[in-house]
Amino acid sequence: MSREPHAPHESALPPGSIPAPDASEGDVNLSPRRGEYLARAHGPDTLALLQRDARVYLHQSLSTPCLNALASARGSVLTDLGGREILDFHGNSAHQVGHAHPRVVEAVTRQLASLPFCPRRYTNEPAVRLAERLGGLTGGRLPRVLLAPGGAAAMGIALKLARVATGRFKFLSTWGSFHGASLDTISIGGEAVFRRGIGPLLPGCEHAQPCAPSSCALGCGGRCSLACAGEVEDILEREGDVAALILEPVRCTTVEVPPPDYFRRIRDACDRHGTLLIFDEIPTALGRTGRMFSFEHFGVEPDILVLGKGLGGGIVPQAAVLARDDLNTAASTSLGHYTHEKSPLGAAAALATLDVIRDEGLCARAERLGHAWRARLRGLIGPSGLLREVRGLGLLVGVELTAGHAAATADLCDRVLYGALERGLSFKVSDGRVLTLTPALTVGEDELERAAGILAECITRAKK
């Protein structure tokens, strides 16, 4: 089994700085700026609610204690209790059609009035239509569907299906990947912030180095040699009995876009070794990258596809597993068995979401706006001398900064994040070096320009 990588040791950190992270997630409750931000940014009502929240919820990295309290959300804008508007370029990757899209709200409201819940052993019209619709979006190549109430649950279904279909129990994924926060999904995932101190984890989970052109750990330098694909091939050959390889076609955290040849070699290796290829598109599907599914950029198809997050329109939790027809081999196994499996509400929200993506041309819009916005960000941030790269597909955008070494870069990104939050822009920091920006696909061009301006201003201030 390959060894889990660790962040380089940093010594003599500047006062008030944060250590270089050892995982792809940012905002891990370590920043000394959290308290300063809360004191400056919020009034007594918000602070009181945050204190009540902190008293009753179990504290955990990445979410509690919280940074703010919201009163409403519409489109690309969050409004907090103090009436301040915040551009949401984070959204937990669940707001492809924006917050509270009226067509999704109307569909859910209508469904509530007729059939709000469907017990197991029964089906319903919205759930059947959703499965038909999802299979149709893959051209009928992944026609078998199971619905689930969340992405981690859907990934668990995919893992169990792979074991039943192949008769094998091992899985291969990559370091730094994220596939959910449940015990089985952190076992295949590769982020230290979720794995450390939680073991023992699910046995039989191997990890390879990811295809990460911006931070290759295999010595590719500026020109990709696909050594990462070679490592995957070697592990599949060595083990001989891997049930499935689980990959993110595009890494949502650090926005790594592999070259097409990588997936062609991966697909060929899986076929040669009888290993199923599972694509995790929970955060990146549904138009985010300018295509309905991000794997469409690479000319390779999975055997199993996992969807979630934005599928419920940012209103109802909804996820799905799509599979080849010949994988319909687990009729006597409970792959999911979730209480809210064929949720009429979730299906209604998902159908409305798919309608909005189609009718408003959001895939093409994301591709057009993303291309122009990445160029604009390069122009605004480049003169700072702190920009390493702006990269992405569609409206999945990563702005990688550099301040000379890992700890200084992590500290720089932390300063930029809290400066932007105060100025009304929310986004994610990944791996202590990448500002991950995922606006709604319905975002206005004026909102993109405003966000770019806030970023440029915060980076300039952080440099000083």
Image (spheres, grey):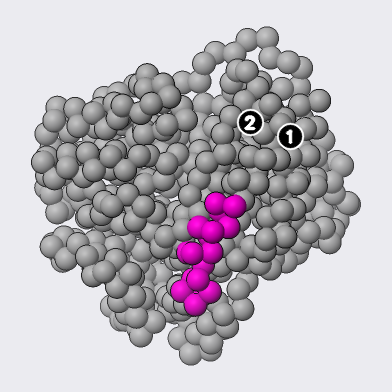
In this view, the residue farthest toward the top is 12
Q: Quadrant of the C terminus?
A: top right
Residue beneath the point at 23% across and 43% down: 264
Q: Give the overall secondary structure of the magenta segment.
A: helix
Residue beneath the point at 16% across and 66% down: 325
Q: Nearer the viewer, mark 1 or mark 2?
A: 2
Mark 1, secondary structure of its residue: helix
Q: Earlier in the sequence, mark 1 or mark 2?
A: 2
| Quarter of the rendering containing residue 27 | top right
Residue 50 position in % (x across, y down):
76, 50
* Residue 257 shows in the view: yes
How far apart in space, not on screen, are marks 1 and 2 (Cα)?
A: 9 Å
Q: Which residue is mark 2?
A: 387
Q: Decide which of 198, 212 is in the foreground and name it.
A: 212
* Mark 1 crowdedness (10 Å alpha carbons): few <14, some 14-19, many ≥20: many
What's the magenta region? 356-372
Q: Give amino acid for label 1.
A: Ile
Residue beneath the point at 55% across and 13% down: 9
Q: Is residue 371 magenta?
A: yes
Residue 211 position in % (x across, y down):
36, 34
Q: Decide which of 403, 238 is in the foreground and name it.
A: 403
Q: Give amino acid for label 2.
A: Leu
Residue 425 position in % (x across, y down):
72, 50
Residue 156 position in % (x across, y down):
32, 52
> Is residue 47 toward the left or the right of residue 75 in the image?
right
Q: Is residue 219 magenta?
A: no
91 in relation to 433, above or below: below
| Label pair 1/2, CB-CB below 8 angstroms | yes
Q: Which residue is mark 1?
A: 459
2 in relation to 346, above or below: above
